[in-house]
Every structure is written in structure tokens, then in C-alpha cells.
Amino acid sequence: MTPTAGLSLEQAPPFSVPLRFFLAAPWYLVLAALLLLWRGPDLFASRWLPATLALTHLLTLGFMAQVMLGALLQMLPVVVGVVVPQPRVIAVLIHVPLNMGTLMLAFAFLTSSPDGFQIAFFLLGLAFAVALTAFHLALWRAPVASGTVIAMRCALAALLVTVGLGLLLDGFFGWGWRVSVVIVTDIHAVWGLVGWAVLLVAGVAYQVVPMFHITPPYSPRFVRLFALTMLVLLAGWSLGLWLGWAAGISFFTLGLAAGIAAFALNTLYLLTQRRRKIGDATLNYWRVSMVSLLAAAIIGISMRLMDSLTQAPQVDGLLGLLMIVGFSIGVINGMLYKIVPFLAWFHLQAELLGRAKVPNMKQLLPDVRIQRQGWVYVMALLLLLVATVYPTVFAYPAALALGINGVWLGVNLAGVGQTYRRLLVSVPASARSSQAKSA
Amino acid sequence: MNAPPDLVVDGRGLEPPEPMEKVLAALEELQPGQRVRFLIHRQPYPLYDILRRYRYHYETTVLPSGDFEILISGP
């Protein structure tokens, strides 16, 4: 058992702290879709095209990092039991430069503007410096090193590597720094997607899969070993790439792919062991996410065993889309539907208990809306995957589906935020528990 | 007069926050002297927080099945 404190009113930050991240993120899916509509099938030609890099960073920084950092501000005090000081100030210091920096970076890629890269360097540098400092301080002071804490520490170490290399690459475009662009880009991408994203999702999954889906817990041995093993494999792989050591690269790639597959299979298995057999609307997001992760691992293994695959440019695209749109965006989308209505409901309940009727979670966000957006999301993912092979036919339908998916998610989440504010405003401040408590 | 019988809320195997929704609804029905007997498959930490905030009394017992029984009485 992990001795977590659970969600604690005394320790949880105000709802506005994570909410600003959660409400902004979906609109980056819309921006990415607009970019895809604008540039069309050409975007799928290579992952090295400036417009493709702009698209990638709208998704990874604008959507993924945005939600993940916002969620950590919420989760660290709750799961780890350490209070992040001044949560409102920290949230603004991360949120504002992260959003400005992401937009500036996309703009810089699209216009090849060195000035744009220089400004993005400072904005994103500031956002991640604040986030990494706050989160590392909190996590290394954690009273108990549970599996989740270990995985989060590893994830944040990987984020540090990802951001450091990202800034280095930005310096290449902004100031003409001497950087081995190809190798550094590969290491940057793999530490971001496999280190930061997979390990953070794993750390969170250890808590939320058993809690939200009433499954047995992950095996303690897996929980203890997974993140650290992956970190060692990542370090070995990077070293192999840096030294041009072919056998080492193959060995560590296979190890990383096997680790990823083990996590995906483990989670899919636990989801078949649910104590309550009625499906939950967010369950399918976990399934799509884990199947995508598994597919990425299988492609990664196949690439090592069949050289011809490594030469095909579509494989890079498939891997990137499976990891970003399939695995990461899928699970984040599903988790947003658990976290946002839950926090709204919980904060309302705590403020208004017995003084006003608080709608339950299903009333705040009906399942049918979650399911409908889920279908559009699956459609967008499939169309994007097919578009890597047949871009001229499928690029535009994929862009449309991605855009509709983003708008739908954004509207669904904003609706919960509005209901929350309306209910709080409808009850006079004197009747709320924070007042009653001091009376 | 005897105290009314305990209100039993069984949240075992339900997805969060349904158990907490049910138990909070039961607390609103509570008669003077009556208790809520809440059964749940894991420690309901967020509930404890709300109970403390509203000064309810509660006592937790671990059942042989590994589930938890929380007896809640009014403030």
C-alpha cells in the first residue's frame, strides 16, 4: 500500500491553480489542426520540416506539458504530501511564459525567425526553470518514497534532460550555437516521450488506475523497479547514440521498448480485472492510450530487427503520432474528464455542504458528452495514422477531426468550469463553510 | 426514546466519487442521535477532510475482508 494522504482540503491548492492549465490545453489541439489544414499533406513528408516541428511542439508543449505541469501542481501536495509554496504565484509564473513561449516557438519554426527562437528560449526557459525548481524541491523532500514518488522523480529528471537539450537546440536556431542537431534532437525527443511522459503517466497510473477503475494494485515489484530501470536504459541508449555504438543502441532500444510494452500490458491486464464490470466513460481513453503505447513498442522492436523499416520515413511519423496523439493525448484526455469534474465537485462540496444542492459528477459532465468526444478523438487518431501513409487523401480529414476533437474537449471542460463558478456565486459568501468554520 | 437505526451506506466497488456522493447525501438525512454506517473498499481520505471541516465525529474500523467501516455521528 502506498501511504498517501489522499485529497486533502488543507493541502490541495485552489481550483484555479490547475484549472487555468486544463482549460487552455485543448485549444492547442485546435491550433495544431489549423496548422495541418494550412500546410496540408506536406507536413507528413518528414519530421524535420519546420512546420512539422511547429505542429509537434504545439501538441507536446501546448497540450501535454501544459496539462502535466498543471496536474503536478495539484497532485504533488495531495499524493506526495508536500506543499508547493505560493501555488497561485507559481502557477502564473509557469502558465504565462509556457503559453507565450509555445506560441513563439511555433511562430519561430514557421517563419525561421532567429529572434522568435531567442524570445522562445527565455520564455520557455523561465516556465520550466520555475516548474522544475518547485517540483524537484517538493519531490526530494517527500516524506515517503512510494512507487509514485520514485516514478515522478525519474520523470522530472527526464524532463530536465528534455528541456536542457530543447534549449540547446533552440540556441542552435536562435544564435547559431554549435550543436549536433540530429543526435541531440533524437535524444531530446526520446527523453521527452519515453522518459518524461511514460514515467509520469506510470507514476500517476499506480494511484489512479486502482482508485478510479477499482482494479487490483500494480505489483509492488513492478512499481519499485520500472521507472529506475527505464531511466538507466535511457541513459545507456543516449550514450550509445552519442558514441555511435551500434550494438549498444540496439540493446537499449529493445530494452526500452520491452519496458514500455510491459507497462502497457500490465495496465491493460489490470483494466480487465475491474471489480465493477460496468464500463466507465473514461476507461476507453486508457485502453486506446495503452494500445497505442504497445503498438509504438512493437514498431520500435521491429525497427531494430528489420533494417528496411528504419529507412522508411513513414515509420518516424507513425511512432511520433502513436506516442503523442495515441498514448499521451489519449490518457491525458481521459484523465482530464476525471480530474476537472472531480475537483469542481469536491471544491463545491467542501464550500457548500448542506447550504446548497451540489450537482454530482455525472451531472457536471454527462457520460454521453465524454463518449461522443471520445469517438471523434479515436477518429482523429486513426485518420492521422493513415495520413502518414496516404497523406494526400487523409491529411485534411485528419486535420478536421483533430480540430473538432479539440473544440469539443475545450467546450466540455469549460462547461464544468462555468457551472462551478455559477454555483459558487449563487450562494452568498457568508453561507459558505470557510465562513462558517471561523464563526 | 431509542436512537433511530444506523443509516447504512455501502460504497464498496463503486467508482469514486459515487461513494462520497452517497455518504454526504445520507449525512443530510441524519436525524438527531442517528449514525451513518459507511462501508468502503479503501480509506476515504477526502471524506475525512470534509467530516473534520464540518465537525462530524467518525470512527474507522478495518473489516476482516479488507474493506473499511466508518461510523459517523453528527457534530
Image: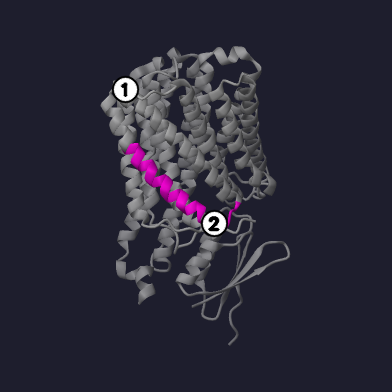
List the residue tagged with mark 2. Answer: B18
Q: Could you give the CA–CA distance between mark 1 and mark 2, rounded to whole angstroms?
A: 48 Å
Q: Using the image as rendered, state which of residue A239 and residue A379 is in the foreground.
A: A239
Magenta residues, dominant SS class: helix
Q: Is residue A299 magenta?
A: no
Q: Using the image as rendered, state which of residue A388 and residue A405 is in the foreground.
A: A388
- Measured from the top left, where is residue A125 in percent x and y? 35, 38
List the residue tagged with mark 1. Answer: A110
Q: How many marks?
A: 2
The residue shown at (64%, 34%) is A259
Q: Is residue A88 left or right of A317 when viewed as pictured?
A: left
- Measured from the top left, where is residue A201 in percent x and y? 54, 41
The residue shown at (49%, 34%) is A192
Residue A307, located in which quarter of the rendered image? top right
Residue type at mark 2: give it. Answer: Glu
- Measured from the top left, where is residue B64 in percent x and y? 73, 65
A124 versus A238 height, above or below: below
Q: Chain of mark 1?
A: A
Q: Which residues are magenta?
A: A123-146
Q: In this rendering, does residue A393 appear at all? A: yes
